[in-house]
Image: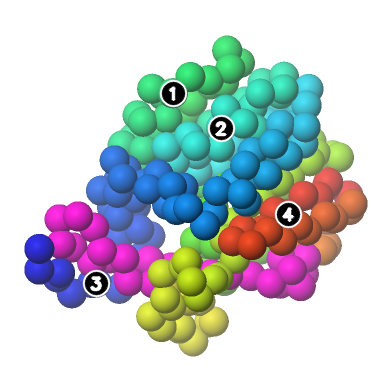
Amino acid sequence: MTAHPASPATEESMARYYAQRAEIYERVYHKPERQPDLRAIEAWLPAQFKDRRVLEIACGTGWWTPHGARDAASWLATDLNPETMAIARTKAMPAHVRFAAADAYTLQGLEDERFDAAFAGFWWSHVPLARLRPWLAMLHARLEPGAVIVMLDNLYSDDSSTPISRRDADGNSYQLRPLDDGSVHEVLKNFPTRDDAVAAIAPCARDVEWTAHGYYWALRYALA
């Protein structure tokens, strides 16, 4: 199919892109070179949330949900897109997993929920740099003192990542991603270093752990 020019990335266009991509989203987890990393993270994740009440941000198609939720006391998986969440709902999940529609930037509708842990897989990289610290502050405010937070995301790799197409004045990076229908979508995708990530959480984090795999990073910390 002929690819059509991409429009600039916006919050609305990003939401449309992930809705359109829902059926093929998990292709990225089938790349052969990434399998050792994925198995290592899947094995590591359950212990991070043992016996905790967990809020998952932007669960997407629910790839990580059953792994993280395995030993948790409770797990609320949230996402803005009904298309991706519909796929997540079809998967075998622990009995204590619930789903709720929620905007990751506001978590509106969850004000009465109490959590002592949070998880965000592959969301950090899509948050504009100017919104990152305000978003983290909002998330932290929804958690109990001492809560554990785990973030997973991509490391940039020349042999496996979609090339960066441009950077804006704020330092955000973007990729051009085609879909099967021939449409091309500009997607905001940042690749923080360890120092970048630690600086963003520094005011209120303790026991910070950063793990770099070949294609992914994991950040774990507790609220100070």
* Quadrant housing residue 204: bottom right
Residue wearing tag 4: 219
Q: Within 10 Å of the Cα at label 3, are there few (<14), some (14-19), or many (20+) other Cα atoms? A: few
Label 2, secondary structure: give it.
Answer: helix
Please tell me which of labels 4 and 1 falls first in the chain.
1
**What residue is pinned by disc 1?**
91
Amino acid, disc 3: Ser
Cα separation between marks 1 and 3:
33 Å
The residue range painted magenta reads 175-199
Could you tell which of marks 4 and 2 lies nearer the N-terminus? 2
Q: Are marks 4 and 1 in contact (CB under 8 Å)?
A: no
Numbered tag placed on residue 7 in the rendering: 3
In this orientation, does residue 124 appear?
no
Q: Residues within 10 Å of mark 4 (few under 14, many from 20)?
A: some
Residue 65: give its label. 2
**Tag 3 or tag 2, which sits nearer the N-term?**
3
